[in-house]
Structure formats: C-alpha cells, structure tokens
Image: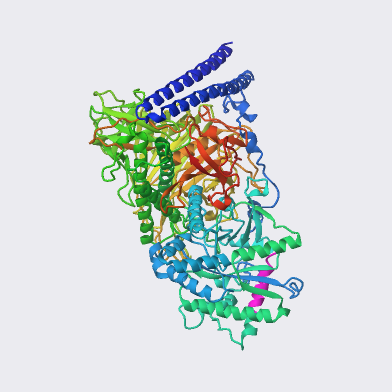
Amino acid sequence: MKRNRALTLLVGGVFCLAVMSLYRMLELMQGAELHNLGDTPSGQVEEDLSHLQKKIDRLEHLLSGNNDLLAMLRDALVQRKESWGTGGVGANLSSDSTHRKGGSLPGCQLVEEMTNAADGVQLLNVYHLLSFDNPDGGAWKQGFEIHYQGNEWDKQPLELFLVPHSHNDPGWLKTFDSYYQDQTKHILNNMLVKLTEDNRRKMIWAEISYFSKWWNDIDEQKRAMVKRLVGTGQLELVTGGWVMADEANSHYFALLDQLIEGHQWIQKHLGVKPSSGWAVDPFGHSPSMTYLLKGAGLSNMVIQRVHYAVKKHFAQQQTLEFLWRQSWDSSPRSDITCHMMPFYSYDVPHTCGPNPAVCCQFDFHRLPGGRVFCPWRTPPQPITEQNVQERALLLLDQYRQKSRLFRSPVLLVPLGDDFRFVDSSEWDAQFKNYQKLFDYFDQHPELHIKARFGTLTDYFQALQRHLSAAATTLPTLRGDFFTYADRDDHYWSGYFTSRPFYKRLDRKLEAMLRATEILFSLALAEMRRFHGDRNLVADFPAQEHFQHLTTGRQNLALFQHHDAVTGTARDHVVVDYGTRLFHSILNLQQVLQSSAHWLLLLDKSLYHHNQSKPFLIMDDVISAQDALPQKTSLTLSEESKSLIVFNPTEQQQTSVISVVVNSLDARVVNAETGRPVTAQISAVWVEPSRASKEVFQLSFLAELPPLSLIVYHVTKASAGSAYRARYIFYPHDNLPAVHAEHFKVSQPDGPEADNTLSLSNRHFQIWSSAETGLLQKLRLQSGLVSEVQVQFLWYGTRTGAYRERSGAYLFLPGEEGAQLYSSSEPPVVRVSRGPIFSDITSCFQHFTHTVRLYHLDGHAGRSLEISNMVDIRSEVNRELVMRLISNVASSNRFYTDLNGFQMQQRRTLAKLPLQANFYPMTSAAFLQDSASRMTLLSAQSQGVASLRPGELEVVLDRRLQQDDNRGLGQGVTDNKLTASLYHLLLEDRMGGTQSSQGGGGASVEHLSLLAHLTSLALCHPPVTMVARSDIQMPKLRPFQPLRTSLPCDIHLLNLRTLEDTQEVGSPSHEVALLLHRKGFDCSSAPEPLPLCTWSSDKEVNLDDMFYPLRFRSLRPSGLTLLLKDDEPSSAQQPPHISRLQPMEISAYRVEMD
C-alpha cells in the first residue's frame, strides 16, 4: 500500500515539475525576448514578437509531448512495481533489472536489428584456425611455393597494371618541411615533366598535405598541366586524405576531419573526387577507416601491413580481394572492395611476385652505379634488344605466380617505395625500361599478357569488368587487422603507447578544435540573424579566425600521419609536430574566446576585438609544446569575477568546474539566477605532503545546458563560509611532515591505521589498501560487489642473444614477463573528503595515482575517475603498466574500441606470444560476463590487453634505449611528465550473454548508454574562461542555442564552417553538420535515467532536434561534403526529416538562422 502511494506521489510530482518547468521556460523566454527589444532596431520589433508567438506555440507542442513522456514514465513505474511484487531477482541485481530484460529502452529494437551475420569471413575465426607456426616458405619466405601449368591464361590473358607511386611520409626521419624541400617538391616537379612526355605513363599520389604545399609553389601554367594530367587519368589522387592516416591510435573525428580537409582541397582546386584508397604503410588496418572511405564516396581500397600468417592464409584461399563489411552491418551498404597486397612490403622487391631476389632486378632505380642496390646481390640490367626476351620471361614468371594468388586474371603490381622518383634519372630508368618490356609482351601474343602503366582506377575498373563478365562476386569479410606482425614474433604493439604525452596532446587539440568549430559556426549564424542583412559584425575578425581554424584542422590532420600520432618519428620531428599542435591550441583558444565574447554580450554594440588584450582569457594555460596545462590563478575580492563555462557537448551536463584562487573563502553564484552553487575548497599540493600557502583549488557544480555558455560570479566570501576538504594521511615509517596549515589533516594510528580505506557516494562504494592507497573492491548501489584491484607493473625487454628488442614500433618483453611494481620508499597515501568530490591519492616514485568519486546525483556520478601522472625518465628499457583485476568471468574475451567509432571483440590466444595479445584502445575497453560489465573509458590512446580472465592492463609509458630495426634509427628516450585520465564503470547486466571460449564469430557489442555519455563528457570537457578584471564589465547573458539535449544516442560530431567558394580563405554561409547515431548495449540502462530522450524511429525531425536553431537550407551529402555527393533535393524545405540509423554518420550541408 505504501509503495502504491509512493508511486502515485512520484508520478504526480513529475507531472507538476514538468508543468512548472514549462511555465518557467516560457517566463524566461519572454523575459529574454523583451529584454532584447531594447537593443533591437525598431523595424524588427514586429518580427521579434512574431518569433515569440511561434515559441509560445512551440511550448504548447512541448506540453503536448510531455503527456507522452508521462505515459512512458507511468509504464516504467508499473513494470518496476511488478518487479517489486516478485520479490526481486537476486541479491546482486538491481531492482529495475526485470524491465531492462524486456528491452524497455526506446531504440533497443533498432540496435538489436544489427544482428551477428554469419556470412563471409570473420577474422576472429581466421585467428582461431591459424597455427602461427611460420615455416620457411622458400623464395617467398613467409608463404609457400606457387605452381602453375602455363595454360591458365590461354582463354583470358593476364591483364597487368603497373602502378607507379612514391610514398611520402609527412614527417618521420625529417620534418614535414625538410622532406618537402629535400625530396617531395622534386618528385612532383619531375612528375609534371615526365608524365607529359608520354601519355602511356601513369602515377598515383596520396598525401594532399604535400600536394597542396607544392600547388601553392607552382605557377598557373603548371597548375593547368596538373589539371590536364588528372583529367586524362595519367595522374590519380588516391584516398585524398591530408595524410595516410594511422588506423590504430587516431580517433574517428580526426580521421574524418583529415579526409574532409583533403577532399575539400581537391574539389576546390582540381574539381575531381577520389574513388580508391591507398594505405600501404599504416601498421595495421581498421574497418572504421573503411566506413569513412565508403561514406566519402570511395569504392575501392588497397592495404598492405597485415600479419604475414593472415596474408598467407588469404593467399592460399584466394581471398586477398574481398568486400570489407562492417561487423554491425547485415546489409552490403557499407561494403568496400579491398585488395590486400600479398607479400612482405610495398617496395619493388616485394610487389612483382613472390621472389624478392628476382623482383629486385626489375627495380631500375637500383641499376649499378647508383646509391641504392639489391641486397640479394643480383643487380638489375638495362633492357636491351639482346636481353629483352630473357628479362621479359623472367619477369612474366613472377607475374604469373603472383596472379595465382587471386581469383581473376587482372593483376595489380605497384612500382615504388618511400620518396621514390626524386631524380629525373629514376623516372627515365623505370619508365623506359618497363616500356621496352611491355612492348615485348605486346609483340608476343602467345605469352597471353597485356601489361601497361596504370592507376588504381584503371585496375579496379578492369577487375569489376571481369567480375561482371564472370557473374561472380568477391567474398565478404568482417573484422580488423590488428595486431600486425611483419616477421617472426615481432608484433607492432609498442606504438599503441609510444610517446603518450603527444597522444594526449593530440586529443586535447581535437577537443579544442571541435569546440571552437561549433561555437564559431553558432556565432556567425547569430551575427547574421542579429543584423538581419546576413552580414557579420564589422569588428569581428572572421577571416583571421577562419584561417586559425583551417590551420588547426591541418595541424590535427598532419598529426594523424602514421609516423606522428604513433610516436614513431625522430626526436626533432616529434618536437616539430608538438609545436604545431601547441600553436594551434593557442590560436583556436583565441577564436573560441572571441566567439564567446560576442555571443555573451547583452549589448552587441560593445563588442570590440583586441587580440593583445582579449576580453576573455583561458583558465587552462599551456606554456610550451612539452608542458602540461597549468591553471590561471584568480585573485578574488568583494568585486565579483566572471567565469564563463562552455559546454561543447550536445547533452545537458552536471560538471565539476575547478579553478585556482588566492582565497580560502569563496562564493560562487549563477549570474543569471543569482543562486549560489555548491562549492568546495581544496589544497593545491606542490609536494605529496606540502600544500601551497598562496593558492587553493575552488571546485563547484555547474549545470550546463547543451552547447551553452553559462556565466558564474566568484567573489571572496566571509571567513570560514566555504567548505574545506578534509585530509587524512596514512602513516608509514618515513612519512615526511605534513604541511597544510589551512586544512584539517589527520593521521590515524594504532589498529585504525591498518583499516581498509573506503569512500562512497550515492551510486557506489570503493575500498582501497591503507598501505598503498590502490583500489581493491567496488560495490554498486544495486548490491553488486566486484573485486576491482589496481596494480602497477614493469615490463622489461629482451636480453641476451636476441637481435631485436623493444623500440618505438615493437613490443618485445623479456621472458620474465610483467614484474610487480615495487619501490624502496612506500608511497604517501592522501585521502580527501568533500561535498563535491572525495579521492585517494598514492604518490609513488614514478607515478602519482588518484581515484576520485564525485558526489553527483545524476548519471555523472556513476563512474570512478582514475588519473595517473607518470614520470619514468630515470628508467632504462622499461614500460610501466596499470592493471585492473576483477572477478568478471570474461574467459579469454574482451572488447576494445576501434578509433572511438565501434567496439571489436578480442580473444587472448595462448598460441600467440604475450605481445601479440595487446591491442589499440582509442577510447574504451571492457570485460563482461552474463551478470556484469567493467568498462574502462580513456581520454587518450594506449595499448591494452586482457592476459587473464577478469584482467585489463594498460601500458602507460615506454622508455627504450635502442632502435628496433624498423628504420627509425633511435630508441624512445624523450619521455615527459605525462598525464593520463580514465573513467571506470561497473554495470549490472540483464539479458546479456558471454560467448564460451573457443571458435565462433565475434558478437557485435556496443558501449552502454551510460558509457557513451560518460565518454562524451570525458573526451569533451567544459571549457572555462575568465573575464578580464581590469576593464569595465559589460552586462553578459548566457547563450543557450538549444532548448533541450539531443537524443541520448545522437552525437553532434561537428558543426564545421565551410570555406566560401567565391572568396578564398573566408567563411561561407554554409556549415557541415555531422551527426553520429551510436549503437548502445541494451542489457543495462543508466540509473537514474539521463535527461536526454531516446527515439525508436530511424527517421528524425532535425528541426525539432535543434530547436530553436533554424535551417534555411539543408542538403544531405557525403561524409566529406563534396558538392558531387549532395543529394539532388538541394535546399530541402522544412520539415527537415532525415533517416539516421544506429552506428551511421550522416553529413549535411546547412545554412543556419
């Protein structure tokens, strides 16, 4: 009976709250509109009143929709009541798990439609089948002997395309600019001359970063020649990305952004669209990249760096060409035709056929007398009339052997290597000698070969013609190609973590770029609306800001190169990359500050741009490319200081904002409502046991609507009015004296000192060791208790007779495996407790480890924050690892994300060496069984493994003194003081499954909705700015462009202002709107439910979703916003209804009002 009354009261309370909220919203809107009338031109008053009337109508619509919300709540409550009536379902399960099992979350049906398809090749099955025994294959050392009869091509001649290429790394042993000056510009200059000499010659080019730089250096006559070569098909731009991107560490935002940057440049200057991808050097391959390529309009791709055992298996099965399909897609719409190169490398000795000693003889750059030679000691010979027959037949034998690995008689043979064709002489040597061989083939039809220079388009068109004529299709494949090994047990899992400082800086720039793109686009739209004539504010430096945005895009894009974000470049090149990232962060902060300044002003006429003295300054300041951010110290007084907080996410966020102040007593109020907010004063620790006497950390709770700028006022308060954190230091024999005179500090003694530490909030409780401060156990509010133990370990590297040791690329641990971290001095263990957060910090010699829980009511308080500050600069050949040990019965399976876009099942295989079982983690990894899931969300890319059931370990940093013989020529010894940040989630599961050990296809799994929302807040934290105090403070009002959060599963990937097609370097009226509808796991639901909504429909109304923003026009387009990909219904009229399927990214070219 009491429960019935409670239910009735709860439903009634929700209804009253909803109605009051709607009236309050109307009141605020009316106040804001009337307030605006004072600074609105008189001619617009009528129009503004009309807008207000429309908003009132809109509120009525919302009130109507509120009834649906209440009905949904009522149904959920009825289901909860039924679960109570059955007495629950077990001590370790939450009370609402019954209705979860029924899939009550809207949208679950859509996600569950993405079934685990059984057709085609599943790479996890291939790994299960392979023995990885690596026998000697003869001439093709990692393969097998290839045989043919000689009559296989009698009916269908061998159709061969020799594809000249030059792989130009945008930074590796030299910086980007040095490579360009020394090599790349000469390659492209010669390309122009040599291709023009003979229209039978062809070439492909991939790196638009270099091509665009060269384009800026050449005159109009040469540009016309380039356009002619592109138009006739002699020169093909492949992939079209700014770089040939890494596919392990790069986040999908950056992968797509570098693709957009390249494609937009090609469209603007050459008017063409890439159709084929070329990825011969990234160290492993991800299906996330193939999804982006397909969405950008590409149909075909070539990959190279795949585990040699997988290549051999595919060659035996003749499946080196396949349709690569997304694991979650049961339809062929994501398919892309993929060609896997079968041999060791993309250089000439490993591309003409299986015998490198023979193929090297046909790399005419290695002719005697040059700087490059054949290591097999048989040099090439110039082709003459006397030797052409013998040479042609020797080469044809290699072509025929290679052809037997494929199902069609169409053969792709690359011709090139790193930075090839620099000298004019190489062009002549390669093209003239090969042309003589081709002419010989043409003159002898009995050889049944048609050979010519070609591009990827030439090759794939011929392949498709053959497949169509034969009425056959290629097999489908699902999965990814990690972790790569090029020979023996040399697994390239080291680069998943190498140079972690810069991997973190990469994500900092990514978050800043996205936040700035969005706010800049909103500011321009608001300016045009405000003026009414669609013009911008005269004093607003839109063109200068747009140039900063463009440079930021290009520097982030450059860092996605497969020797940049990977941490595999020379030291001075890493500094060059870091400097570019650092400068772009500073310049983007200027754009963000300026855009926020204009949007916040109540009286827009007061806006004045002064870059030397900006109105807003950043709270976080980075002083150098290798320095961690530092907080700006705020001097408080009775005069209020304005803090501006920007929420760059599309969701309402409850966030903890921390600033450094000079006062122990501070008061924070919301500037709009005048209401004080909960705050906490904590110590700033300059040493593990010594707090600063001058500055203190002020933390407060901020309620941040989506994409909003909210103003808070901070003032000095009366003594003792602010809550101060309390500290406990756990003693050991050598504990230094604690200096924190402004804070209550205690040290337990006796039996109390040995008790387990414990912290809790309303969602969970944790227990940690009093000796080390490291986590031991976690209990959810539902009653689920899990062992979650944190350990730190060292890996060493091989010693003794081994020639190769761990380096920038390779992880080759010593035979002893991981060794538990130990230190001569016990750690300082410091516990803090406060109303906003409580934490446990362990200060070891090589790292400081903190676990923090937030005292937040909503879902934001459900995760445990873990942060590490690592410094291993004193070490030699060591790698530091953080391991989580749980009692999740995960068997040999775990899941890691691919580029932050999708989750991929992994299997730890005993038949593989330890280093082979490490995989890239861009932003998430989890373990699960049928009852629970443990998820680690990460703010940076790192290597991760689950070497035993229930365990997850992350490599934090690597310091290695030697080169690993992959061309870099140095070790990794430029380590920095490096921060890493995570959130740990433990969740109940109902209706979840855990596959048994052994074979079987990979199950398609997604992050939970709670994990998605937590990861969003982790990767895109609020941006805090401070208004200058040395000027007269104008009136500010908050900027809230959206009335409500976007649906829970729809992510605003970007709102990117496009370049004006008429005015170079200027922003256009159009922006790229990129939305990603995420798939989420339906076996658990956030508790409490978040404020956002779900939709069970594939079609969504974008006008409703973004209200009150209006779209003057909206045109669906391809992912890189090429005009040729725009849907024909351009300038589609409202309502703008769009089809958004789970996992899919949708792109629109829009004009905003």
Pick the residue in front: 538 or 211: 538
Pick the residue in front: 999 or 116: 116
Residue drawn where x is 39% and y is 24% of the image: 34
Quadrant of the rendering where the N terminus is positioned: top right
Q: Quadrant of residue 138?
A: bottom right
In the image, residue 537 sits, relative to residue 320, either above or below, namely above
Residue, far bottom: 386
Does residue 811 belong to the magenta stretch? Answer: no
| Left or right side of 334 for 750 | left
- Stretch of the chain drawn in magenta: 394-406
Pick the residue in front: 389 or 563: 389
In the image, residue 955 sits, relative to residue 201, either above or below, namely above
Pick the residue in front: 919 or 568: 568
> Taken as a whole, is the magenta stretch helix, strand or loop?
helix
Q: Position of residue 765 (x, y in %)?
A: 46, 29
Q: How many marks?
A: 0
Residue drawn where x is 46% and y is 73% of the image: 422
Camera sees residue 835 = no
| Left or right side of 796 for 907 | right
Does residue 402 belong to the magenta stretch? Answer: yes
In the image, residue 136 sits, relative to residue 424, either above or below, namely above
Camera sees residue 397 = yes
